[in-house]
Amino acid sequence: MSVVIPTHNEAQSIGLVLADLQSVGDIVTEVLIVDSNSSDGTPKIAAKMGARVLHEPLRGYGRACLTGLANASAPDVVVFLDGDYSDRPAELPLLLAPIIEGRADITIGSRLGKQSIRGAMPWHAALGNRLAAFLIRLLYGLKLSDLGPFRAGRADVLRRLDLQETTYGWAVEIILKGALGGFRIVEVPVSYYPRIGKSKISGTLRGTVGAAWFILSLIVRYYFRRRKAGIPRPA
């Protein structure tokens, strides 16, 4: 199993993330840090702790995830995880369980269903997530409560989805294409804590508005594309 972690200046937290991953045992075969021009020594810390570091000069959350997916060494499952220690990598077995048991092709960690520290998710981010999840339920019939970044998928399924979004829209593209492709998407409750350092998305007005625009517009765009193509609503 490969774990992909996009980073940009996560020196304060990346050591904690990697230490937690080491604690889950031999289920993790490789950790790929996809770093976008960090200036605080993040890649050096990650490499020292045994992670494989990939340098992605172009910014974009989706681009970093796609770079990691493309470079994963023939895994059976790929996990995507933020480097800010807001999710707990030690809960990886919970996220993987539905896939290992044959009940899911893709799992999404819901930050609303387990232990969540008050204020860990800014109110505007929580509102945007709830709105996006509502639209996905309404238009696609897929019951989700959150679009959390802690997620996993069978490698063959992820590659069949032909993921292309390079920015904020990647977070929802995998869900929409998975649902339209008839793949099993299961939500798993995970813990969520205040991130270490400032968020590049929810920590700024520009990031929040940009993420909301990409995500919500993608949900609507795929819906009308599906209707135009005559693709039935997922069961």
Image (cartoon, helix red, strand yellow):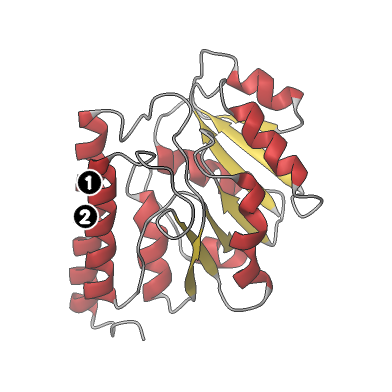
Image quadrant where residue 166 sits: top left
Is 230 located above or below residue 119 in the figure?
Answer: below
- Residue receiving disc 1: 212
Image quadrant where residue 229 sits: bottom left
Residue at figure coordinates x 36%, y 86% from the top left: 235
Residue at figure coordinates x 24%, y 37% from the top left: 208
User: Label 2: how many residues lie within 10 Å, few (<14), some (14-19) or many (20+)?
Assistant: some
Q: Quadrant of the N terminus?
A: bottom right
Instruction: Give the alpha-carbon distance from disc 2 to disc 1, as whole Å.
Output: 6 Å
User: Label 1: how many residues lie within 10 Å, few (<14), some (14-19) or many (20+)?
Assistant: many
- State the mark number for residue 216: 2
163, 108: nearer the viewer = 108
Residue 159: x and y in percent read: 54, 61
The answer to whether residue 206 is left or right of residue 69 is left
The answer to whether residue 4 is left or right of residue 234 is right
Q: Amino acid at mark 2?
A: Leu
The answer to whether residue 61 is left or right of residue 95 is left
Is 63 located above or below residue 9 in the figure?
Answer: below
Whether tag 2 and tag 1 are in contact, CB under 8 A, the answer is yes
Is 72 located above or below residue 97 in the figure?
Answer: above
Residue 43: x and y in percent read: 62, 22
Looking at the rendered structure, the secondary structure element under dot 2 is: helix
141, 127: nearer the viewer = 127
Residue at figure coordinates x 36%, y 29% from the top left: 200
195, 106: nearer the viewer = 195
Residue 20: x and y in percent read: 69, 40
The answer to whether residue 15 is left or right of residue 134 is right
Image quadrant where residue 174 sits: bottom left
Q: Amino acid at mark 1?
A: Ala
